[in-house]
Amino acid sequence: MSDVKMKKKDLEYFQILINDKRKVLLGEINDSKEKADEILKESSSNAIYSSHMADASSDHVELEKAYYMIARNKKFLNYLDKALLMIEDSTFGICEECNIIISKARLEEVPHTKKCFDCKSNR
């Protein structure tokens, strides 16, 4: 492994950026959980009344969508947590294939990436 490392101020910048993204994700996860809980609550309270099949189907679709968003956001949250660990051990922002510093623009868009644009494109 080479001695290539990002500058400390850049690592601090990305740590703040990633933590901000984490806060947004945690809010979205919470919102999706509340939405799923509300759908479950409404469907169970309406169960004693005859409901239209289309309404039940619509509720099911909304519930599945909420669960999908929770899973998707938790997966992305895991990637962001790994990026924070990479910042701690100073491996963040270094391409694992060519060992150069990944562009700031790419890291802002995909902060958990381990490859520069060229190495990712040349699979």
Image: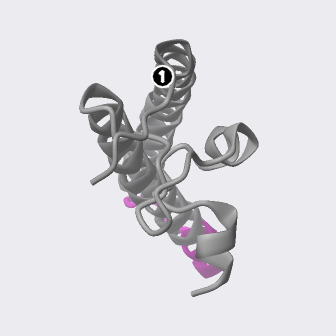
The amino acid pointed to by label 1 is Leu
Indicate the position of residue 56 as horizontal and vertical percent values: 54, 71
- Determine which quarter of the picture holds residue 41: top left
The C terminus, quarter of image: bottom right
Closer to the camera, 44 or 17? 17
Q: Is residue 55 left or right of residue 1?
A: right
Q: Residue at x 67, y 38 (%)?
A: 108
Display coloring: one colour
Indicate the position of residue 71 as horizontal and vertical percent values: 39, 58
Q: Residue at x 59, y 73 (%)?
A: 119
Closer to the camera, 43 or 114? 114
Q: Is residue 65 left or right of residue 104?
A: left
Magenta span contains residue 49: yes
Q: Is residue 101 above or below residue 16?
A: below
Q: Is residue 103 left or right of residue 18?
A: right
- Determine which quarter of the picture holds residue 90: top left
Q: Look at the image and give the residue range highlighted in magenta.
A: 47-58
Q: Secondary structure at mark 1?
A: helix
Q: Is residue 11 above or below residue 95?
A: above
Magenta span contains residue 117: no
The N terminus, quarter of image: bottom left
Indicate the position of residue 7 as horizontal and vertical percent values: 51, 21
Residue that protrudes farthest toward the front in the picture: 3
Q: Is residue 28 above or below residue 65?
A: above
Crowding at mark 1 (Cα within 10 Å: few <14, some 14-19, many 20+): many
Question: What residue would you read off at disc 1?
Answer: 11
What is the total number of numbered labels drawn onto the structure image?
1
Q: Is residue 49 above or below residue 25?
A: below
